[in-house]
Image: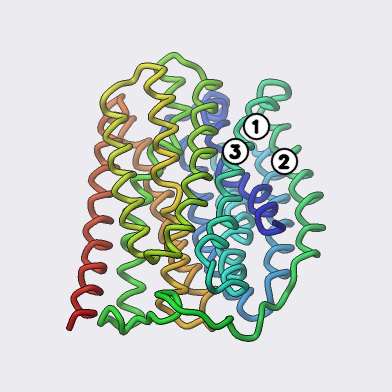
Amino acid sequence: MIALALGTIGGVGMWSVVVVMPAVQADFGTGRGAASLPYTLAMLGFAGGGVLMGRVSDRYGIMAPVIGGSLLLGTGYLVAGLAPSIWVFALAHGLLIGLGSAAVFGPLLAHVSFWFDRRRGIAVAIAASGNYLAGAVWPQVVRFTLDAVGWRMTHIIIAVTAVTLMVPLALLLRQKPPAAPAAGTGLARSASPAALGLSPNVLMVLLAVAGVACCVAMSMPQVHIVAYCADLGYGVARGSEMLSLMLAFGIISRVASGFVADRIGGLATLLLGSTLQGVALLMFLTSDALTPLYIFSILFGLFQGGIVPSYAIIVREYFSPGEAGTRVGIALMATLLGMAFGGWISGVIYDLTRSYQAAFINGILWNLINLAIVGWLLMRRERLARA
């Protein structure tokens, strides 16, 4: 529960910028592509920070990166609130906010995975749900304070809140997991990279490419739904409601995917989630009316919530426990690079076409790349198992 709470509070770094994007764009007088840059840099910081914080966690335990991340997060929001230009605002998100938020995602998921064996999938999924719970709660909080005190004071309030709540919670974390995992049976205990006929590094590269691809697709609705609704004339409030619904229902699929992964393994769970995500993206192409957009947002959340935690489960299934923090960090870094690139390129596509239809199609094509890689890995595993 501590991991869930930390993920919920620290997850603000991924979602606040989505809500304030139209206000920041108007204040600094930039285009949609430039206004998307703070989100992109936040994801890059989150991505690199996941690996860095994972290595710190492997060496010193979980408390050090979480406390450090809390302080970075608070400093980043303070700098962002005082930023004189879009570039300072963007750099604050990349160098401070993204890095700080990373401490309460990948490293915490790896840490939690050591405490469970038979129910590892559901445990990791619940811990990962903090990120989506943040996405359900924070957009509404940010929207309220944005209307009440403006985007600058909103960032300063978040800075104080993050440090005040996260540091005491970090001090409650249990540093060292059990020396050895409990005895058990099943895929998560018996698999190794050799089970796929691949070296660990080759498998890591394939998972990284798959992670980039699925999250370029995922980023289109998550990053741009608020701006999309504003462009359609529905307003920022409706868009932030859709984002919150998307991520609230993502919690349901995230927890459900943990149960599924405990039964069929991380790879099969990833394939299922990616397939459903592609279906949801296709739905967004069929209508831009208000009610369908609410429905599509709910379905998108229900369909794709289990994708990112599946990578952490796959790493624990196929790689050495001694490098779990680093490997999970690399896998999640790839997904975040996909979110960063996808969020930026969708804004650029919009600037070129004045429409989000082409951006949705771009996401669907990237989703097909993910399906091809994961499907091939599963077929390879089954073929080798029969040999």
Gap between marks 2 and 1, in whole Å? 9 Å
Q: Which residue bears the numbered disc 3?
A: 16
Q: Residues within 10 Å of mark 3 (few under 14, many from 20)?
A: many
- Contact check, label 3 and label 1, Cβ < 8 Å: yes
Label 3 with label 2: CB-CB less than 8 Å = yes
Q: Position of residue 345 (x, y in %)?
A: 34, 42
Observer-nearest residue: 27 or 156? 156
Q: Which residue is disc 1 drawn over?
A: 142
Tag 1: Cα neighbours inside 10 Å, few (<14), some, or many (≥20)?
many
Q: Which residue corresponds to the image point at 60% horizontal and 44% vertical from the top-left?
A: 133
- Separation (CA) of disc 3 from disc 1: 6 Å
The numbered dot on residue 286 is: none
Q: Looking at numbered disc 3 in the image, what kind of residue is underneath it?
A: Ser
Mark sitting earlier along the chain (3/1) = 3
**Which quadrant: the N terminus?**
bottom right
The answer to whether residue 309 is above or below residue 275 is below
Residue 25 placement (x, y as % from top left): 51, 28
Q: Amino acid at mark 1?
A: Val
Give the residue number, with chain letter if any, for mark 2.
Answer: 158
Q: Does label 3 or label 2 sit earlier along the sequence?
A: 3
| Up-down relation of residue 203 to residue 262 (above or below) | below
Place residue 276 in its image quadrant. top left
Question: Horizontally, is 71 left or right of 332 in the view?
Answer: right
Q: CA distance from mark 3 to mark 2?
A: 9 Å
Tag 2 near tag 1, CB within 8 Å: yes
Secondary element at tag 3: helix
In the structure shown, which secondary structural element does the residue marked by tag 1 occupy?
helix
Q: Position of residue 40 (x, y in %)?
A: 46, 47
Q: Dividing the picture into quarters, in which one does residue 282 lie?
A: top left
| Dot 2 alpha-carbon crowd within 10 angstroms: few under 14, some 14 to 19, many 20 or more | many
